[in-house]
Image (spheres, rainbow, N blue to C red):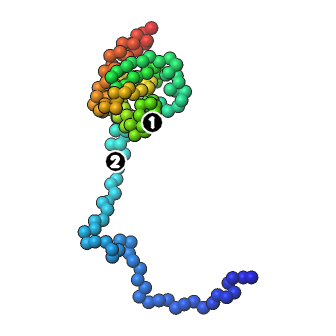
């Protein structure tokens, strides 16, 4: 049975004075309501200099395993750095923060601080290394400034001497 057989074929006359609300019209808003601020356009040129590019990250499991298999370790107060001469022109960063370090928000905070410390100190570090940074228990109290200083001091003092030795031989 067809459901349209009982419908009328005549159309209703159009209604006059039909009121449709505007998108920003709402009578429940108070007089002090503020409209949202206009969207800002982003300058692509300024973002490219401050970002942490994907090519500087260690992502794959085999990259971490390669560092772990034939690494050299430098230990500081807040972090341990496993490093390997990679042959790349850029120094790349990997971070291993296990559940033993703390809860997820503590691990994420540590990783954010280390990435920012690496990003700001990238040009002071030796080139051609793959780094894996592991937190120590004192890293819970570490600030960005202290992590950056320790990263630069550990890599510049011990690693430069050994990298120079590795490249010469």
Residue at 35% across, 34% down: 113
Callouts 2 and 1 close, C-beta under 8 Å: no
Toward the top, the furthest residue is 169
Where residue 37 appears, x then y in whole percent?
A: 30, 60
Residue at 44% across, 26% down: 132
Q: Is mark 1 on a helix, strand or loop?
A: helix
In this rendering, does residue 89 appear at all?
no
Q: Quadrant of residue 119?
A: top left
Query: Mark 1 or mark 2, which is nearer the start of the sequence?
Result: 2
Q: Is mark 2 on a helix, strand or loop?
A: loop
User: What crowding class fits label 1: few (fewer than 14 Cα within 10 Å), some (14-19), or many (20 or more)?
Assistant: few
Q: In which quarter of the image is residue 141?
A: top left
Q: What residue is disc 1 on? A: 54
User: What crowding class fits label 2: few (fewer than 14 Cα within 10 Å), some (14-19), or many (20 or more)?
Assistant: few
In this rendering, does residue 135 appear at all?
yes
Q: Nearer the viewer, residue 57 or 67?
A: 67
Where residue 120 appears, x then y in whole percent?
A: 32, 32
Q: Which of 131 and 133 is in front in this view?
A: 133
Q: What residue is disc 2 on? A: 43
Q: Is residue 23 above or below residue 146?
A: below
Q: Is residue 83 above or below residue 39?
A: above
Where residue 101 appears, x then y in whole percent?
A: 41, 31
Q: Is residue 49 above or below residue 33?
A: above
Q: Is residue 4 above or below residue 132?
A: below
Task: Please identify, in this view, whether the residue under mark 2 or under mark 1 is nearer the observer.
Answer: 1
* Picture quarter with the N terminus: bottom right
Side (left or right) of 68 relative to 145: right
Instruction: Count numbered badges in the picture.
Output: 2
Spatial CA span between label 2 and label 1: 20 Å
* Picture quarter with the C terminus: top left
């Amino acid at each position: 049975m067809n459901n349209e057989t009982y419908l009328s074929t005549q159309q209703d006359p159009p209604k006059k004075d039909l009121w449709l609300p505007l998108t920003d019209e709402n009578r429940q808003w108070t007089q002090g309501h503020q409209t949202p601020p206009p969207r800002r356009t982003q300058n692509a040129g300024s973002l490219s200099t401050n970002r942490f590019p994907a090519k500087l990250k260690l992502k794959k499991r085999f990259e971490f395993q390669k560092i772990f298999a034939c690494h050299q370790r430098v230990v500081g107060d807040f972090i341990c750095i496993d490093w390997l001469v990679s042959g790349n022109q850029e120094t790349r960063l990997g971070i291993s923060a296990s559940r033993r370090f703390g809860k997820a928000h503590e691990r994420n905070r540590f990783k954010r601080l280390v990435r920012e410390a690496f990003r700001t100190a990238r040009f002071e570090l030796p080139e051609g290394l793959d780094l894996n940074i592991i937190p120590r228990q004192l890293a819970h109290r570490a600030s960005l400034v202290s992590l950056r200083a320790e990263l630069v001091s550990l890599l510049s003092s011990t690693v430069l001497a050994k990298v120079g030795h590795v490249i010469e031989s």
